[in-house]
Image (cartoon, helix red, strand yellow):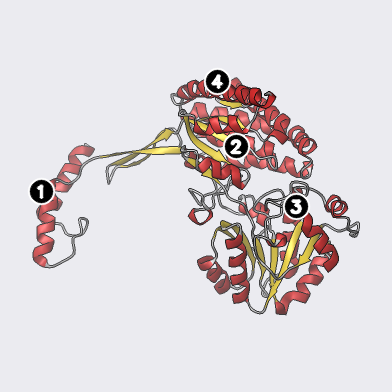
Amino acid sequence: MISLDKDLVSIQEVRNLIGQAKEAQEKLALMSQEQIDKICIAIVNAAERESEKLAKMAQEETGFGIWQDKVIKNNFASSTVWNYAKDMKTVGVINEDKLNQVTEVAVPMGVIAGLIPSTNPTSTVIYKALISIKAGNSIVFSPHPNALKSILETVRIISEAAESAGCPRGAILSMTTPTLQGTDQLMKHPDTALILATGGSAMVKAAYSSGTPAIGVGPGNGPAFIEKSADISNAVRQIMESKTFDNGTICASEQSIVVEDSARDKVVRELESQGAYFLPEEDAKKLEKFIMRPNGSMNPQIVGKSVSTIAKLANIKVPSNARVLIANETRVGKNIPYSREKLAPILAFYSRASWQEARDLCTDILNNEGAGHTMTIHSKDEDIIRDFSLKIPVSRLLVNTPGTLGGIGATTNIAPALTLGCGAVGGSSTSDNISPLNLMNIRRVTYGVRELSDLRNTQKSSIDDGNSFDFQTILTNEMVDSLVSRILERLQ
């Protein structure tokens, strides 16, 4: 009975929040680009000012990650994202092609439903609010219950800052009684225009099954291939930095290392010199039991935990200076935990005879889990890099950069984002790093430049000549003169 009452409270809260958000969004839609940007700047400044406080709150509440790294993520979600998006035209006429007589107008989507995970709670709120407001939308968050306090505090801070800069009250809101039933209501409500889903596979699948347009992301499980021509010392450094950043809680982080047999010993020595600990077979089997739960999902007990905490959990001994735990592996499969996504400082290690076999293994790993997401390759051989780019089933192939920071656009020049599309192969509606451009529609205003008679004459001419039918290249002199005259008249 208590659970039912909580569900009813949550459902009613969602209905109220969407009503407020819809009213606020209608006011946002009337604002100028300058007014919208002023609100965004206020959000960014507030997030930067409180980034350390929010980072500590998130770490203390969830037990995941390292608060100092969460500060970096909060600042990335605010200032880095804003520096990329600040000059985007997202209000009114955003493009005018006078030659072809096509004008593009930005149209906000409306109320966005933002699903927030416990792994990156504060940074994801900042990021999703910022790109939603930039595109003229309001947003209602569904917080992960295990990160409720830090999420609500983040919403309070940025919403107050936004309102002080002229944002309509109710444009940035959050559920305070999150339940599955309440979140379901948020996703299926007729006034919810789009779902922006970041979280577990079940939640993302529910978003796509809701009947509401959705942008969701599948699991990451990116392998890192260290090809023999690579700067191995630098490659290992980047992988170690990436896998230990916030204890591996970003889904673009590396999950396995793949090498060629000829480079294996050199890579192993370099990993060990930089703090990686290769688990003895017996200890690897002990840890393996804690990576996945019986239902095949990742064990939350290891997520974002330090090496020492994970070692205690698995009852194994590791050196005090160990930064990452590595298990030798040869297999790939749903029931092979080391071949799956591990949001913790744990890596699988594979070796193959050639780079072609390594490429095929990376493909197998991704097709087992993580297809469409991200992988990294460390190499100086452009031909091999090109081969991977043409054949590996990912939306982001990162070259000579850390997976975590490269995938989100921090150390690369792709769009900075904390929601990474996986494309059709990964069950996602887009392969983009999600930006404000993904959160608005474009209305195209276009003038007629041909008449039906022109089309008939063109078709007849092409048939008589035995040529293929092409509107753009098969035009009579008369038609060209007519078209030019009409265009000039319109432009005057």
Graded by Cα atoms within 10 Å as few (under 14), some (14 to 19) or many (20 or more), the crowding at tag 2 reads many
Q: Where is residue 465 in the image (x, y as percent from the top left)?
A: 10, 66
Q: Which of marks 1 and 2 is in front?
A: 2
Image quadrant assignment for residue 139: top right
For the residues labelled 3 and 2, the Cα–Cα distance comes to 22 Å
Q: Is residue 34 left or right of residue 489?
A: right
Q: How many angstroms separate mark 3 from mark 4 (CA)?
A: 38 Å
- The tag on residue 115 is 2
Q: Where is residue 414 in the image (x, y as percent from the top left)?
A: 56, 52
In the image, 325 versus 312, the foreground residue is 312
> Amino acid type of disc 3?
Ala
Q: Work out whether mark 3 precedes mark 2 in sequence or the reverse, and give the earlier one.
A: 2
Q: Name the residue under label 4.
A: 16
Question: Mark 1 belongs to which amino acid?
Answer: Ser
Q: In which quarter of the image is the C terminus?
A: top left
Q: Is mark 3 on a helix, strand or loop?
A: loop
Coordinates of residue 400 in the picture (x, y in percent): 65, 63
Choose the circle earlier in sequence order: 3 or 4. 4
Q: Which residue does the numbered mark 1 point to in the structure image?
A: 453
Q: Are the residues at dot 3 and dot 2 in contact (C-beta closer than 8 Å)?
A: no
Tell me which residue sits at (57%, 35%) in the image. Answer: 114
